[in-house]
C-alpha cells in the first residue's frame, strides 16, 4: 500500500490483536467469534506532535483519490451498526459485562481511540448521502469524513501521534482477509498552518517508506549525509571538512569565556562566569537583588521595607493573605471549614453468631459538635462504591436496609447483631434515640440497588452513580449530629473477608444550612482512619486536657471539647448508650437465655425429658435433674401400681392384693385387686331344712331345694308307709293292706297288715 505525501505520515500498518479459537467463558461463552481474527490498523508518523485531524473520501473534489471503505469478503463482526465510527458500547467498562463484552471487537473507524472512554475526543462522522455502520465492510464511501476538531496547541490527545509515532485508524474483526482504502488530513507537528493531505496511490513503494515511488525523491535510503544511497560520512567531520572559522567538526565557535562550542554570549565583568549564569553582574542591594534599588530590609524577610504588606501570614488561618508580608495579628483560625478535618473510621470486631466473620462499623468523624450529616450518596462524578469480596451477611430476620429494631430485640435474636445495614447515626430503631429520624432513600425503595445489597445475603460489590443514597429530611434530627464520641455511624458490614470502597457525604458544617453544604469523598481499604487526601486541615481542636477529645496537636480551640460521659460505649453490647464515651464497666452482652445482662438462670433447669423434674421450657441444664420422686411401679396390674410415677423402679408385687374378685364366691375378697384364680363356691346349697336336699353346711341358698324325692306316707301303720320319707305328702293308704289277720280264719289274708274285722270262720264245721 503506497501513499502520496511528504514524510510526516509514513503509511499504514496492520497488527493482529486477537485470534479467536473457540468459546471463552470470560467474554464469548457461545463461541460467536470462533474462526475470527481482530486486527488493529494504525497510521505511522514521523513526529510525536503530528496530528491526524480527518480520514475522508471525496472522489469528486480530489479526482483520482481512493474511496473510504473496508472490503472483507468473509464479512465483519459488527454488533454496533449505528455508525461507521467507534460507538459508545465499545467501552472498557463493559468488557467484563457478559452481554456487552463482545462490543470491544466491533468493526469501526476511529482516530486514536480503541475504546470510546479512552482519553481524548471521539471522532464525528459526516457523509453525503448519510451512511450508518450497518454495511461497514461492504460500503464504499465517495463523500464522507471522520474528523476531530481542535486547534494548534489544543488538540485532543487521541489525535496526536505521541512517542510511539502511530495513531489507531480502525479495528476490523473478520473471518478472512480484508483490504481498505482511505485518505487523511494531517497537521504537521500539530500546526494548522502546516496541513498535508495523504491519499492512496496506485504506484509501487519499493523502499516501503510510505511514499509512492513516482513522487519519492529517493527510492532507497538516505545516508547519514542526506545522499540517496550515498557512501556515508567519510570526510574528516563525517560528511564535510571542519568549516573555516569554526573550532570543531560540529560547527562550534569559541564563546565569550573561551570554551569551544560553549554557549556563553557575554561576560561583561570578565569574571569567567557567563553573564547568563552569573549571580550578579554588578552589586547586590539590601534584599540581595543584583543592581536593585532597595535601601533597607529591617526584618530580613527578603522584602524591601517600602514593599511590605500587612495582613495574616499564617497559611493555616481562615483569613490567610498570600500577599501579606508582615503579620498584623489579625489571623482567624477556627471559623472556616477544612475538609481534611473530616475523617472516616473503619473498626472491626468478631461477629457474634458467625464463626470466621468480621463485623465492620464505619463512622464519619466530624471536627465540630454542631456539624450535621445530611446525606450519604453516589453520583456519576463521585460514585459510592463498596467491595465485599467475601460476600455481605444480611439476616433474614431484617427485611429493611436500615437497623429498625429495639435494643431488646438483639438478645433473643442475636443474629440481628451481625446484620449489615446502611444508616445515618442509628444502630437501632429511631424510637430509641429521642428526636431521631430514620434515613430515607433517594429514588425510593423499588428496584433500588441499595435495598438489595443491604437485605439480600451474599452481595460482593455495590456501585451507586445515579444520585442515589440516603438522607435525613428533618434538619434537627438528633441522629445527624455527632455522638458523644464526635462521630456518626453510617454503615455496618459483616463478612468473612476484607472490605474497601468510597463514600460520599453531604455535611452542613458548623451549624450551617444547605447553602453552606460541603461534599466529602473519602476512600478506605480495610481497618483504620482515612481522609479525603486533600491535606486541607486546620490546627484547631479541643485544647482542654480534661476533655474526652483532647487534641495535643491542636494549636487553637474550636469549642469542640466533649465532656467525659461514663457508660457503655461499646456499640456491640446490649447495654450500649448513645451518650457514653467512657466505658464505666457497665457493658454487658446477652446471656444464653436471650436476656440482656442476664445471669443465665431464666432459661436454666432440668432438660432431661426422662427426669422427674424435666422442664420443657428450659434451654440450659442446671444439673438439678432427679429421678426418685417420680419412680414407682408402672404396671397397672400390680398391687402397688403408682399412677403418678413416670419411672419404673422394679418394685411391682402381685401378692398383697391377690384374692377372689368374684363377689358371688364363698371366699370373695372385697379388698383384693388381682384375681388369684382360687374362688370357692362350696357354700352354695339348699338351706331349707325340711327340703329333701337340705344341706346343713350350705350358707347360701342356690334355689336347688326340692320337696318330692323325700315325700311319702309318714304313718307307719299305713299301707304305703315310707320309712325314708321325711315329708308327708298326704298319700297314706289304709285300705290296700286291710284284711283278716287271723290266720285261723277262713279268709285269713297273709298280705294284710291292717285288721279290718272281716275274719270269717264259717268254714269250720261241726
Image: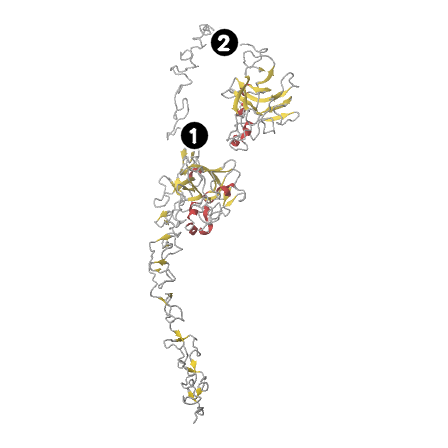
Query: Does label 1 or label 2 sit earlier along the sequence?
Result: 2
Residue 711 lies, with reference to residue 612, above or below; the image says below
| Image spot of residue 621 (x, y percent) | 35, 53
* Alpha carbon separation for disc pair 1 and 2: 62 Å
Whether residue 182 is visible here, answered yes or no, is no
> In the drawing, does residue 11 fall left or right of residue 420?
right
Residue 150, picture quadrant? top right
Category of crowding for the residue at label 1, using alpha-carbon neighbours closer than 10 angstroms: few (below 14), some (14–19), many (at least 20): few
Instruction: Kindly state the secondary structure of the residue where label 2 is placed.
Output: loop
For the N terminus, give its image quadrant. Answer: top right
Quadrant placement of the C terminus:
bottom left
102 lies above or below 461 = above
Q: Residues within 10 Å of mark 2 (few under 14, many from 20)?
A: some
| Residue 12, x across and y down, in percent | 55, 18
Mark 1 and mark 2 residues within 8 Å of each other at the beta carbon: no
Measuring from the top left, give residue 312's x and y in whole percent.
42, 36
> Foreground: 258 or 440?
440
**Is residue 480 at all visible to an observer of this figure?**
yes
The residue singled out by tag 1 in the image is 307
Q: In the depicted view, which residue is nearer to us: 503 or 706?
A: 706
The residue at 51%/35% (across/down) is 381
Image mark for residue 223: 2
Q: In this rendering, is residue 414 above or below 689?
A: above
| Identity of the residue drawn at 61% across and 14% down | 202
The quadrant where residue 108 appears: top right
Along the viewing direction, whichever of 88 and 579 lies nearer the viewer: 88
| Viewer-side label of 1, 2 | 2
Q: Position of residue 35 (x, y in %)?
A: 55, 24
Dividing the picture into quarters, in which one does residue 630 lie? bottom left
SS of the residue at dot 1?
A: helix
Q: Residue furthest bottom?
A: 766
Residue 31 is marked as: none
Amino acid at each position: 500500500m503506497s501513499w502520496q505525501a511528504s514524510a510526516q505520515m509514513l503509511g499504514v500498518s496492520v497488527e493482529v490483536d486477537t485470534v479467536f479459537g473457540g468459546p471463552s467463558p470470560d467474554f464469548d461463552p457461545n463461541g460467536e467469534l470462533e474462526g475470527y481474527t481482530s486486527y488493529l490498523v494504525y497510521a505511522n508518523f514521523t513526529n510525536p506532535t503530528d496530528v491526524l485531524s480527518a480520514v475522508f473520501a471525496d472522489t469528486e473534489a480530489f479526482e483520482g483519490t481512493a474511496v473510504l471503505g473496508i472490503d472483507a469478503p468473509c464479512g465483519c463482526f459488527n454488533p454496533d451498526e449505528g455508525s461507521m465510527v467507534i460507538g459508545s458500547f465499545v467501552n472498557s467498562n463493559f468488557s467484563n459485562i457478559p452481554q456487552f463484552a463482545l462490543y470491544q471487537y466491533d468493526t469501526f473507524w476511529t482516530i486514536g481511540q480503541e475504546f470510546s472512554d479512552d482519553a481524548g475526543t471521539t471522532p464525528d462522522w459526516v457523509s453525503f448521502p448519510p451512511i450508518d455502520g450497518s454495511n461497514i465492510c461492504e460500503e464504499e464511501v465517495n463523500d464522507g469524513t471522520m474528523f476531530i476538531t481542535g486547534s494548534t496547541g489544543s488538540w485532543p490527545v487521541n489525535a496526536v501521534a505521541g512517542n510511539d509515532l502511530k495513531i489507531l485508524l480502525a479495528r476490523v474483526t473478520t473471518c478472512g482477509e480484508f483490504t481498505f482504502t482511505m485518505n487523511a488530513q494531517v497537521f504537521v507537528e500539530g500546526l494548522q498552518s502546516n496541513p498535508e493531505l495523504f491519499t492512496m496511490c496506485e504506484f509501487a513503494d519499493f523502499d516501503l517508506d510510505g511514499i509512492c515511488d513516482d513522487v519519492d525523491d529517493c527510492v532507497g535510503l538516505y545516508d547519514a549525509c542526506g545522499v540517496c544511497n550515498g557512501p556515508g560520512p567519510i570526510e574528516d567531520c563525517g560528511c564535510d571538512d571542519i568549516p573555516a572559522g569554526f573550532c570543531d567538526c560540529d560547527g562550534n565557535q569559541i564563546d565569550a569565556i573561551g570554551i569551544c562550542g560553549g554557549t556563553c554570549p557575554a561576560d561583561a565583568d570578565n569574571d569567567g562566569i557567563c553573564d547568563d549564569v552569573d549571580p550578579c553582574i554588578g552589586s547586590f542591594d539590601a534584599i540581595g537583588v543584583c543592581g536593585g534599588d532597595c535601601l533597607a530590609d529591617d526584618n530580613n524577610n527578603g522584602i524591601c521595607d517600602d514593599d511590605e504588606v500587612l495582613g495574616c501570614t499564617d497559611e493555616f488561618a481562615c483569613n490567610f493573605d498570600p500577599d501579606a508580608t508582615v503579620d498584623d495579628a489579625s489571623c482567624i483560625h477556627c471559623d472556616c471549614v477544612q475538609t481534611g478535618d473530616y475523617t472516616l473510621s473503619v473498626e472491626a470486631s468478631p461477629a457474634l453468631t458467625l464463626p470466621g466473620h468480621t463485623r465492620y462499623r464505619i463512622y464519619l468523624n466530624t471536627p465540630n459538635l454542631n456539624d450535621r450529616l445530611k446525606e450519604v450518596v453516589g453520583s456519576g462524578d463521585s460514585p459510592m462504591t463498596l467491595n465485599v469480596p467475601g460476600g455481605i451477611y444480611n439476616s433474614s430476620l431484617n427485611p429493611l436496609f436500615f437497623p429498625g429494631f429495639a435494643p431488646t430485640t438483639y438478645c433473643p435474636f442475636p443474629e440481628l447483631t451481625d446484620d449489615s445495614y446502611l444508616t445515618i447515626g442509628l444502630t437501632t430503631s429511631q424510637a430509641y434515640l429521642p428526636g431521631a429520624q430514620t434515613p430515607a432513600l433517594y429514588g425510593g425503595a423499588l428496584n433500588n440497588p441499595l435495598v438489595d445489597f443491604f437485605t439480600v445475603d451474599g452481595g460482593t460489590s455495590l456501585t451507586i452513580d445515579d444520585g442515589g443514597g440516603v438522607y435525613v429530611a428533618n434538619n434537627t434530627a438528633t441522629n445527624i449530629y455527632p455522638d458523644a464520641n464526635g462521630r456518626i455511624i453510617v454503615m455496618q458490614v459483616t463478612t468473612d473477608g476484607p472490605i474497601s470502597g468510597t463514600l460520599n457525604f453531604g455535611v452542613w458544617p458548623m451549624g450551617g444550612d444547605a447553602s453552606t453544604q460541603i461534599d466529602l469523598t473519602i476512600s478506605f481499604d480495610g481497618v483504620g482512619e482515612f481522609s479525603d487526601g486533600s491535606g486541607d486541615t486546620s490546627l484547631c481542636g479541643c485544647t482542654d486536657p480534661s476533655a474526652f477529645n483532647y487534641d495535643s496537636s491542636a494549636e487553637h480551640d474550636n469549642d469542640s471539647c466533649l465532656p467525659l460521659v461514663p457508660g457503655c460505649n461499646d456499640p456491640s453490647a446490649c447495654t450500649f448508650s448513645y451518650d457514653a464515651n467512657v466505658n464505666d464497666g457497665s457493658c454487658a452482652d446477652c446471656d444464653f437465655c436471650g436476656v440482656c445482662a442476664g445471669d443465665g438462670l431464666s432459661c436454666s433447669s432440668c432438660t432431661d425429658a426422662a427426669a422427674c423434674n424435666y422442664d420443657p421450657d428450659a434451654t440450659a441444664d442446671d444439673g438439678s435433674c432427679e429421678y426418685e420422686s417420680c419412680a414407682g411401679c408402672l404396671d397397672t396390674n400390680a398391687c402397688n401400681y403408682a399412677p403418678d410415677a413416670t419411672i419404673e423402679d422394679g418394685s411391682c408385687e402381685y401378692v398383697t392384693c391377690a384374692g377372689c374378685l368374684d363377689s358371688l364366691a364363698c371366699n370373695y375378697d372385697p379388698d383384693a385387686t388381682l384375681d388369684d384364680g382360687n374362688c370357692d363356691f362350696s357354700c352354695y346349697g339348699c338351706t331349707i331344712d325340711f327340703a329333701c336336699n337340705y344341706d346343713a353346711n350350705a350358707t347360701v341358698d342356690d334355689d336347688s331345694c326340692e320337696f318330692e324325692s323325700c315325700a311319702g306316707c309318714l304313718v307307719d301303720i299305713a299301707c304305703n308307709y315310707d320309712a325314708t320319707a321325711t315329708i308327708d305328702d298326704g298319700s297314706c293308704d289304709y285300705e290296700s293292706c286291710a284284711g283278716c289277720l287271723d290266720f285261723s280264719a277262713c279268709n285269713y289274708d297273709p298280705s294284710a297288715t291292717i285288721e279290718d274285722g272281716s275274719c270269717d270262720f264259717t268254714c269250720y264245721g261241726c
